[in-house]
Amino acid sequence: MSADSKRIKILALVTLIFGLAATVVSLVLLFVSGMAPAYGFAVASGVVSLYLGVQGALIANVPNTIKKLVTLSTVLLLVQVALGVALYFVAGTDQVPPYCVICTSVLLALLLMIFSRSLNKKNLAK
């Protein structure tokens, strides 16, 4: 496994762990807050990050399939941004924890997209 593949694998595992933690914590906050809709967006963002982490870790094992991760991370990055915009229109700016979850998810998806695109270009150049 090349150094770039290892970097993607580690980042995918970090995304997976973050997605799991964000989903669990957001679910707890959702039930404690009396079903505030803002935490529903945080749960959705955590689930998307969890899915991206699982798929990224599986795809990173085979460098020839990294193009799938480029596409997946791009689409899920757009989903995360859409969740952030929807959260702004639903809850405004008074809910800080859901924004933290969504911004971190966007950052992780963006990093996965950048690193997988870089590896994909290296694979195509060979």
Image (tube, rainbow, N blue to C red):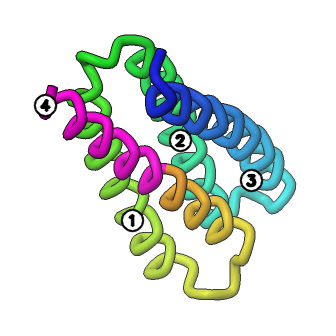
Q: CA distance from mark 1 to mark 4?
A: 29 Å
Q: Earlier in the sequence, mark 2 or mark 4?
A: 2
Nearer to me, 56 or 81: 56
Residue 73: horizontal and vertical position, in percent? 34, 43
Q: In the structure shown, which secondary structural element does the residue marked by tag 4 occupy?
A: helix
Q: Earlier in the sequence, mark 3 or mark 1?
A: 3
Q: Crowding near pointer 3: few (<14 within 10 Å), some, many (20+)?
A: some
Look at the picture and state if 60 lies above or below 105: above
Q: Earlier in the sequence, mark 4 or mark 3?
A: 3
Identified at 81% across, 62% down, the residue is 33
Q: Nearer the viewer, mark 1 or mark 4?
A: 4
Residue 94: horizontal and vertical position, in percent? 69, 86
Q: Nearer the viewer, mark 2 or mark 3?
A: 2
| Residue interval drawn in magenta | 109-126
Identified at 49% across, 34% down, the residue is 8
**Residue under circle 2?**
49
Image mark for residue 81: 1
Q: At label 3, which amino acid type do we have?
A: Leu
Image mark for residue 30: 3
**Residue under circle 4?**
124
Q: At label 1, which amino acid type do we have?
A: Val
Q: CA distance from mark 2 to mark 4?
A: 27 Å
Given contact means CB atoms under 8 Å apart, are the residues at marks 3 and 1 in contact?
no
Q: Earlier in the sequence, mark 2 or mark 3?
A: 3
Is residue 123 one of those drawn in magenta?
A: yes
Residue 66: horizontal and vertical position, in percent? 28, 26
Q: Nearer the viewer, mark 4 or mark 3?
A: 4
Nearer to me, 42 or 116: 116
Q: Earlier in the sequence, mark 2 or mark 1?
A: 2
